[in-house]
Amino acid sequence: MLQQSIALGPMGFSIHQLLIGLAFLLALLAGALLGRRHRIPVSDTLFTLLFVAFIGARFVFVVRYWGEYEGVLDRLDIRDGGFDIIGGIVVGLGYAGWTLWRSPRLRVPLSGALLVGGLAWGLTAGSAILIEHQSRPLPDIALTTRAGEPIDLPQLSQDSQQPIVVNLWASWCPPCIREMPVFEQAQQQETEITFVFINQGESQAHIDTFMNEHGFSLDNVWLDPRNAVGQATGAHAMPTTLFYDANGQLVNTHFGELSRATLQRGLERLR
């Protein structure tokens, strides 16, 4: 549920990103009120804390999946969504502790702001995680192959008896195009996992032309002309990748572009 997406014009955001933004705004508000009372501003400190936690989350993730990146630029490219939330929290709390020890005047307003923000994020994200743990099977939606044959995900799961990775994409989506070589390589290497690429809303002729122009060689490219899978799974922006275990239950979702590192993180939960 946290990785379900919302499209706002040309931009897309995951539910988790919006919850983090809401929690930070509440922390800023609490910090402003408490800071005014104690006559010391804390907004700059909160923005610095957010930046430090952000860098820490990225750094920990890159260290964990160092070998999956090809160079420095790839490790700096945050478009793949590669962040370690626990690592970011630990780094952020470390910075906050150092700041509170160094500046006694900040202790009350900054602690209050962090408490409000932490509770807001914990309660909303925690509730979403509890809902997410409920059974969420493969959507039973009629789809077609590029050859025009009817097919659906539950039937594929029953036939393959393998975990399934479902990628929702469209030819007009630049991140979808950038991540396709990653999937192409993974489909060749991960023989115990089935990959399915469900196009959202485009015609067979358009998809064929697109695949030929880019030279992509992918198995299981399916058509969903009514965007039914995206609506059923809450993926209203693309790309979105869904990870299902061998029993057809959703275990992970990644909204946005994938790199080899973020794909590897998703696959780890299927093994």
Image (cartoon, rainbow, N blue to C red):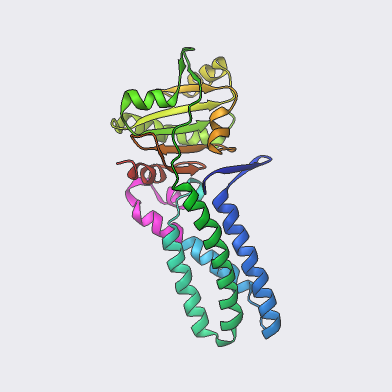
Quick check: 87 above or below 37? Answer: above
Give the image location of residue 206, x and y in percent: 57, 18
Q: Which residues are magenta?
A: 57-76
Asked if residue 63 is among those painted magenta in the image, a careful observer would answer yes
Q: Residue furthest front?
A: 134
Give the image location of residue 248, x and y in percent: 38, 34
Give the image location of residue 214, x and y in percent: 49, 24
Where, by quadrant of the figure, is residue 249 drawn?
Answer: top left
Quick check: 38 above or below 162? Answer: below
The residue sitting at 61% across, 79% down in the picture is 109
Q: Nearer the viewer, residue 90 or 132?
A: 132
Dominant SS in magenta: helix
Q: From the image, which quarter does the C terminus lie in?
A: top left
Where, by quadrant of the figure, is residue 158 drawn?
Answer: top left
The residue sitting at 41% across, 26% down in the picture is 154
Question: Does residue 7 appear anywhere in the picture?
Answer: yes
Give the image location of residue 122, x and y in percent: 52, 62
